[in-house]
Amino acid sequence: MAKECRRPKALTDTPFHYCPGCTHGIVHRLVAEAIDHLGIREKTVGIAPVGCAVFAYNYFNTDMLEAAHGRAPAVATGMKRVRPDNIVFTYQGDGDLSSIGCAEITHAANRGENITVIFINNAVYGMTGGQMAPTTLLGQVTTTSPYGRDPKDSGYPLHMAELLATTRGAAYIERVSAHDVPHIRKAGQAIEKAFRYQMEGKGFSMIEVLSTCPTNWGMTPVQAMQWVKDEMVAQYPLGVYKDLGEKEA
Amino acid sequence: MAKVIFNHQACKGCGLCVSVCPKHIIALSHEELNEKGYAPAECTDEAACIVCGFCATICPDMAIEIIEE
């Protein structure tokens, strides 16, 4: 039997504005549950991105800052360095993190900033109408790749977890998925571990969560979950890409 | 005894809970739409519920809660 499941204290009572079936809501809950479980709500500072999750500051019941598009890791760097006792996390989508914010995230990871990054990868720009993102799969039809993504024109899907795992500063990089109940539970454990690493001062951690965008993919929420399972997981293998673990505290 | 509670006003009718229920006892109620205009999910047979929590785990809008009574 499942244990009690109520709205986490780290979320406000504001209803999410996300489309029906959007996994942003699931990941918001996982982050809030991790914050509740670790008892760090009073000292957590979240950095909201630009994208669908731009209103994250209305939803997380922690201190929140809004950053310019892609610059959340830079803002988090400043926040963490000025207030090292606070727990600082960013919550970013793939347009935000892997496109316009690619420089900020790469250097924050390389510097080993002691922050936690939650990266939502749903392979499109959601808020602006489903345009092609760096993470869009080959052949995937979006509003700006109506014949499917062609690598001759627009390159290949960018694998941020693998990329950041090559930086020496990163402590913990894992890719998880939110497409079914077992994977959602695993994602929750990974997110909590990432926050724990920050509390222990281990350094930079990023959890990439494969997510859905039913509206822009033109699918029902259930079809979108299946598409993540069939297509996205094949292109973006799940797993731990880097984990310094107990070695370097 | 734990119980599953559906908050009809918070539901957006996405149907993810319907797809994961192992007992197939969740359905979208098209008879009465909620304030947002969605057909909310509801349990059709509470006696058959095993309180596995799958529906609450996958719900993106926390419209499903499990409470201890």
Image (spheres, rainbow, N blue to C red):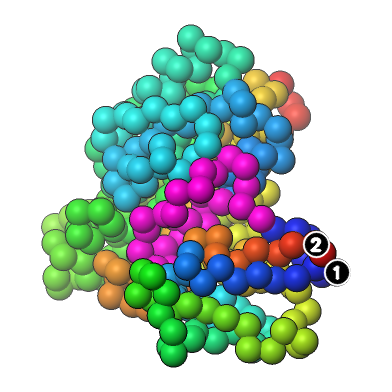
The chain containing the residue under callout 1 comes to B
Q: Is residue A41 left or right of residue A25?
A: right
Q: Quadrant of the N terminus of chain A?
A: bottom right
Question: Residue at image x 75%, y 70%?
Answer: B3
Rendered location of residue A242, percent (x, y): 59, 39
Q: Quadrant of the C terminus of chain A?
A: top right
Q: Is residue B11 above or below residue A136?
A: below
- Reading the image, the residue beneath label 1 is B1
**Marks 1, 2 in one chain:** yes
Q: Which mark is residue A27?
A: none
Q: Is residue A26 magenta?
A: yes
Which residue appears farthest toward the right when viewing the image?
A: B1
Q: Earlier in the sequence, mark 1 or mark 2?
A: 1
Rendered location of residue A17, percent (x, y): 36, 55
Magenta-drawn segment? A6-29
Rendered location of residue A233, percent (x, y): 48, 65
- Residue A168 visible in the shown view: no
Q: Is residue B15 above or below residue A59?
A: below
Which quadrant would residue A47 be assigned to in this image?
top left
- Reading the image, the residue beneath label 2 is B68
Q: Is residue B69 left or right of residue A125?
A: right
Asked whether the beta carbons under mark 1 and mark 2 sit within 8 Å of each other, the answer is: yes
Secondary structure type for disc 2: strand
